[in-house]
Image (tube, rainbow, N blue to C red):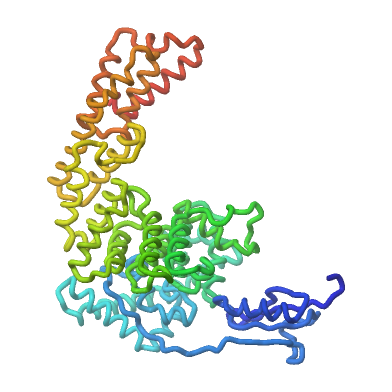
Amino acid sequence: MAGGTVFEILTLRGGSWSIEATATSQQEAQVEAGRMLNRPFIDGVRIIKESKKSIAQLEPTDILFEKVKQKTEGKVFVQQILDAPLCSTTDDLYEWPARSTINQLMRTYLDKVNLTATELMHSAKEIKRLLDEGTLINSASAKVAALQAKKTDGNTNARRDEIYDFIRDINARVKTATDRKLPRVRDVGFNGLMQAVNGSFAGPDAGFMARVAVTAELIDNRNLFGKLATLLEWATEVDDETSFQVIDVFISDILWNTDVLRELLGSQRDLGSALVTLICFASGEPIDDGIPEDLDPEHPKFINFTLNRFLAEGRLPDSQAVLFDRVKRQLEGVNPLSRGDREEEREVFSGLLSKLIPDIEVVGGPSIAEAVTQRQSMIINKGGQKGLKEAAASMLPSLADPGRKAGYLLALLECALGQDLLRDDIDQHLEKILVLPPSVNHIVRDKMPPNLKMRKITSIYYRIEQSSLSDEQKDKLKSRLDDLLTSYIVDGKLLEKLDNPERPLHIRARMLVSMVQPEMLPNGRASSLAREIIIKHLRRPNFEKEMVATISDAAEKAQVLRQFHEQLNRCGFFG
């Protein structure tokens, strides 16, 4: 209302107050302030009447309402972990597997001080603070050493000494790097920083110095969501993969924080809904109605839209891995997927499977295949080794499509559970799905055109070829699929239908060559049938002239011949 009183809502973030919103009544302002106080990273709210005073100059009498979250100094401890990758050099600690371990071990500490694992390892001040504290680093080193010793000679003390050597080396490197006068991002921009670093350093040293410089820029911002916004703003300015790799390291560390994920995903009905949203986000599926044309860092959804776009483009592989790791750990956890009964739990899980195993590739890879098996064992309420075996078997009917079944089993084979407990079961399931059926139609039961059925069988063939199955088992399954494809082509007289003399020769030729495209048929007996007919045509005198004889336009003739040659080349007819 023009000329009316305006009430300003202030929020406290990272120790600083700022104006967040306005309202036309104090009651409306208090309702909105209550909503804001429930958000992560907002530590307090105030309501004041619109004033010309600076926020820093407010008097107690100016504040109409104030509420600040009570800070509890919860005990900082080292988290439990089940595995720790071996590191042979200091540089290994900066890579994804080691940083993943550090992010898990030091979660409560990092969340308390609002730092990322990478910042911690690239700031002399923060390393000193952690070393001076003593207890945490000693406890973390002992846990890692005990796990790693089982993979080596079993000497925990020796392994712990190596870890301490790595820590001392990191500390020395950071101190040396701090003495190098690198430009600040705020002065030269992120591209300018990367140019300066790449001009002075090479190989791992360039990456290390870039991370030191980025840490120097981010470390004073003790708001993880604010760090994320800054990194994404820099990312919109760069194109080269090396720069994105540096940004990805920091973003992936930030995404370990639970509050950041909650802020990104918004309010969710239950765990199942949250996981579906997280899977879609991590996969780069568009959110809302697409990115607005006027998107800039001031837009309220800048972080969500920009992060989602870079994930879709494959620019942030470590960040994507963190998100799918979160999905994995939640699936393996004990929290129910829904708030309803067991039947609703099954329905929610089925929806999750449609996202995680949409076709022959499992989204998130072998670790997700293992996680859904663990969750299935909880749903059927059977534990132990027997429960896991029954879980894997009972997963298959719900997947329905043969590509999804094969993809799940072959991904499961590549994780520890599949290699150990379920190895024989996986072989038996694959034989039942792919060897025992008498025809292609008994494997692919859906009503679909012949070309799509052949594509489905061929995609399974290639997935088997790339799998961890033994060579003997691979050959057995591939040979059987080739036999089934051959019978399908012969019994259905598919080649005769394609090579119908009533059709123009150029159409017949194109359709025959399409039969031996790599995605249609694998190189084997089935494709040889079509190749023989194609070669027979190619050997005819004046074949190409005959092929375009019914086409009157010279340009169209040339285009048909060019496309035909491209098809032949793709199928390996020219060597």
Residue lying furthest left: 472
**Quadrant of residue 458 within the rendered picture:** top left
Residue nearest the observer in this picture, 38 or 354 = 354
Residue lying furthest bottom: 60
Residue 213 visible within the image: no
Residue at 66% across, 81% down: 17
Residue lying furthest right: 3
In x, y percent, where is residue 71? Answer: 53, 88
In x, y percent, where is residue 160? Answer: 25, 80
In x, y percent, where is residue 322? Answer: 40, 65
Give the side of residue 278 with respect to residue 92, left or right.
right
Residue nearest the observer in this picture, 123 or 24 = 24
Give the side of residue 126 with respect to residue 170, left or right.
right
Counting every numbered tag in the picture gives: 0
Give the side of residue 112 with respect to residue 63, left or right.
left
Is 417 drawn above or below residue 506 in the view shown? Answer: below
Give the side of residue 548 with respect to residue 93, left or right.
right
